[in-house]
Amino acid sequence: MQAWLRVIIITLLPLSMRSFADYYQTPMQEVQWQATGSRTVCYLQQLIPFYGSADFIQRAGEPLQFSIQEQRHKSPVIKATLTAMPSPWMPDAAFSSSAYPVYLDQAGDSDGYGRLSVYGDAAESMLDILLQGHYPTFTYLRNSSVINLEETRVEVSSINFSDSYKEFLNCRNNLHPVAAQNYTVQTRVQEQQKQDIQNLQSSTLFFNQGSNRLNILAKRELAKIADYMKQSSEMKVIVSSDTAVAGTDREWFARRAAVVIAQLKQMGISANRVSVRQSLSSWSERQDKVIALHVFGPDDLRFFYFTDSNNTSLHSKDKQRLDLLARYIREYFNQGRLVISSHTDSKGSRIDNQAAARKRGENFKSYLERKGVPAAMIHIKAYGEERPIRTNRRPEGRALNRRVMIDFVG
C-alpha cells in the first residue's frame, strides 16, 4: 500500500442549520473536471479555488477512493461527514441522502497534505451522485481551542462531469490486471486502531496561556490513554515538557503535570504508573511500554531580551523558541490574536528607540509568518522606552527593559 495509509475514521457529524466558518465551492463558470492516469492508477480531479481539490483515485487492485484535499496546513479534523446535496437548480423536495463515514488519510503524499476520504461502495455512490447532477458535500469540524466551533463545508460540483467521467471510466477499464487485494473498510479500521495506539504513545496536551486547566480536548486524550492503560497493565506514562528548551518552565510544568496526574488518577490510573520528567532526552525505558505525554503551554516561550539598545536581530535561541510558539499556534491556538509588545531602554533618542522597537516587532512577525502563522493573527505594539519595568539608571534594569513579549488573546 501507499505511504499515506495512516487512516483515522472520523465521527459522523450531523448536518445542521448553523453557519459555516468556511464554505468552498467552484464557481459554476469555472468548474472543470480533468481525467488523467496510467496502467496503475487513474485520477479524476476538480480544482476548488482557495481550498484545494476533489479527487477520485483508482489504483490497480484497490477500492475506489473519493476525497478532498486542502492545500493548507491547518489544525486536525475531529468530526466529518459526507452527504449529497441537490444542485442549485434542482428542488430540495423529496431529496434525501445517506451520510457516509469519512476517513482521514494522514499526510504522506509528496505534497504533504492529508485527505478526507471515502472508499469502495461509498466512493462508487459519489460517481452516481455526480452523474445525477447532485453535489457531494463534505462537512467537518477542526480541533480548536475555542468552545463554539463552526463547520467547514466543501461542495463538489457536478457541472461538466460526464465527459471527463467517460475518460476516467476508460482508464479504470484499462488498469493493469493485478490480483485484487483483500483490503476492505474493516482492514482500514484495524490499521487505524493500530496507528491510534502508536499515536497515544506520544501525545501532546496543550494549555492556554496562564492556565492549568485541562481543556475538553486534553480530557478526551487523557480518557483514551486511561482506557488503553486499563487494557494493557504493563503500560506506564511519563509526563514531560515540550517547552523545556526555554529553560525556565519548571514552575508552570510542575503545576500542569500535577493536574494531569490528578486527572489520570480520577480516571482509575494509579500514581505508581505515572512519572514526571522535565525532558525525555535521556529516558531509557522500553518505548513500547511507555506513553510519552507531552505538556505544552506557551508561558515560558513568551519573553525575549536583547543585549543592547540597537540590537534588533533574532538569535538562534530566539528562533528555537519561536519555532515552538509557531507549532503551538498551528496545532492549537488558531482562532485568536497574537500580540507582540516591543520595548527598549532609554539609552539613545526617543525616536531611535521607537524605531528599534518597531523593527524588533516586525522581525518577530516576519519569522512567525515564515513558520506558517497567518499574518492577520499577528499584531505589533511598539512602545519604545515608554513602559519600563525597571529603572533605566542601572545596567541590570536596562537589560530587563529591552524586551519583547508575546501574548495570546482569545
Image (cartoon, rainbow, N blue to C red):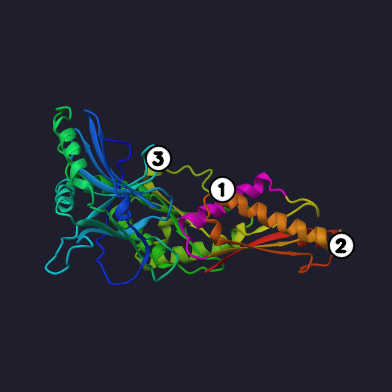
Asked if residue 191 is positioned above or below residue 249 in the image, the reply reads: above
Per the image, is 315 magenta?
Answer: yes
Which of the two labelled residues, at mark 3 and mark 1, occupies the earlier sequence position? 3
The three-letter code of the residue at mark 2 reads Arg
The three-letter code of the residue at mark 3 reads Asp
The three-letter code of the residue at mark 1 reads Arg
Q: What residue is shown with label 2?
A: 394
From the top left corner, tell me how far across and down residue 57 is, in percent: 24, 40
From the viewer's perspective, tell me whether residue 316 is left or right of residue 336.
Answer: right
| SS state under label 2 | loop
Residue toward you, 191 or 71? 71
| SS state under label 1 | helix
Q: What residue is shown with label 1?
A: 370
The residue positioned 51% from the left and 68% from the top of the image is 212
Residue toward you, 143 or 386? 386
Q: Main secondary structure of the magenta part?
A: helix
Which of the two labelled residues, at mark 1 and mark 2, occupies the earlier sequence position? 1
| SS state under label 3 | loop
